[in-house]
Image (cartoon, rainbow, N blue to C red):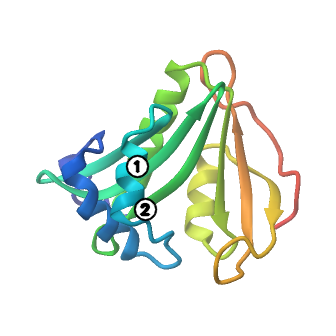
Amino acid sequence: MSTEGVTEVVVDRMREADVPHVVAIDRSGEGSSAWDEAQLRGELGRNWAHLWVARRSEVPVAFVATWHVADELHVLNVATHAQHRRRGHARRLLEHALAFAAERAVRLVLLEVRRSNAAAIGLYRAFGFVAMGVRERYYSDDEDAVEMLLRLDEAGRPVPSVDEVTL
């Protein structure tokens, strides 16, 4: 993995002015969720939604969208602009989201990922996520989603777990 540009990136909350950039990031990816501006603005207004961007020269190059509900953090989307991939931006955003989770006594971090997205699955596994289920034909193109889970202890550290399903 190239680390070029990683130190130049700052992670902070997504702002209203970031919405067009985040839509462009999302649409630059393969199999993206294709969020539109209205959906993102709606997320910014929800008190349980927490969205962060990785900025390079004040311009968002990656983002993560989450929902914090009770003792769970649901990762809705992690995306990096196609021109800025393989530089550690998604890793930094996940680290930030997991630090947020630890500060708020989150016990479970949940997400879905395309079965074919080996790079993302590898990244999630590096943080301790395990496969807990498969949602068949979950995405609009009928691709399956792998449900992944990370358990956190009282101190916010990952609890070692094993896959509940075979991929």
Up the image or down, 137 lies above or below 151; here it is below
Q: Residue at x 50, y 19 (%)?
A: 103
Q: In this view, does 20 lie to the left or right of 103?
A: left
Residue 12 seen in the current view: yes
Q: Position of residue 111 (x, y in %)?
A: 64, 51
Q: Nearer the viewer, mark 1 or mark 2?
A: 1
Residue where numbered disc 2 is placed: 79
Q: Is residue 74 left or right of residue 46?
A: right
Q: Position of residue 158 (x, y in %)?
A: 66, 31
Residue that sits furthest to the left in the current view: 57
Q: Nearer the viewer, residue 147 or 88?
A: 147
Tag 1 secondary structure: helix
Q: Nearer the viewer, residue 25 or 158?
A: 25
Residue 85 seen in the current view: no
Alpha carbon of mark 1 to alpha carbon of mark 2: how far?
Answer: 18 Å
Q: Which residue is drawn at 31% across and 48% down?
A: 53
